[in-house]
Image (cartoon, helix red, strand yellow):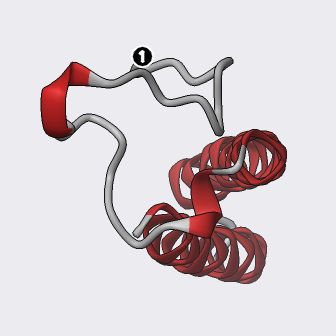
Amino acid sequence: MVMFMAHIAFIFEVLALAIGLAAIHYGKELHARLIKTAGILLVVFATSGILCTGYYAIKYFFMGHYKHAYDFNIPMKDNMAHDHCSESVGD
């Protein structure tokens, strides 16, 4: 489930990056300063989002979150600890 959410976030960030690049292009063509500024902001935020999503996707991979299809925040039988991912944030 975590990997699926990472993919969805990554797709939206790439779309925002593409829209930002298109806004910069059309802002230059139309000499529209506001459109160009909005495009630059979109590119900056989309790039930082892509880097953040990539960092946490890799971090969660090494923590073992992709081995199971369920979220770790659900209660487990007899409140057992998650021995397979002891560094998990949800423990």
Q: Amino acid at mark 1?
A: Asp
* Rendered residue at 71%/41% (across/down): 56
Q: Nearer the viewer, residue 87 or 42?
A: 87
Q: Where does residue 6 sit, x and y in percent of width and height?
A: 55, 64
Q: Nearer the viewer, residue 8 or 82?
A: 82
| Quadrant showing the N terminus | bottom left
* Rendered residue at 66%/46% (across/down): 49
Q: Quadrant of residue 87?
A: top right
Q: Quadrant of residue 10?
A: bottom right
* Rendered residue at 73%/68% (across/down): 24
- In the figure, is residue 57 to the left or right of 39? right
| Quadrant showing the C terminus | top left
From where the camera sits, is residue 32 visible? no
From where the camera sits, is residue 34 visible? yes
Task: Please determine whether, in this image, residue 56 is positioned above or below residue 21.
Answer: above
Q: Nearer the viewer, residue 59 or 13?
A: 59
Q: Where does residue 44 sit, x and y in percent of width and height?
A: 74, 43
The residue beneath circle 1 is 91
Q: Residue furthest front?
A: 78
Q: Where does residue 80 sit, x and y in percent of width and height?
A: 32, 25
Q: Nearer the viewer, residue 48 or 65?
A: 65
Q: Quadrant of residue 7?
A: bottom right
Task: Please determine whether, in this image, residue 67 is positioned above or below residue 15.
Answer: above
* Rendered residue at 65%/21% (across/down): 86
- In the figure, is residue 59 to the left or right of 87? right
Task: Please determine whether, in this image, residue 72 is positioned above or below residue 29.
Answer: above
- In the figure, is residue 36 to the left or right of 54? left
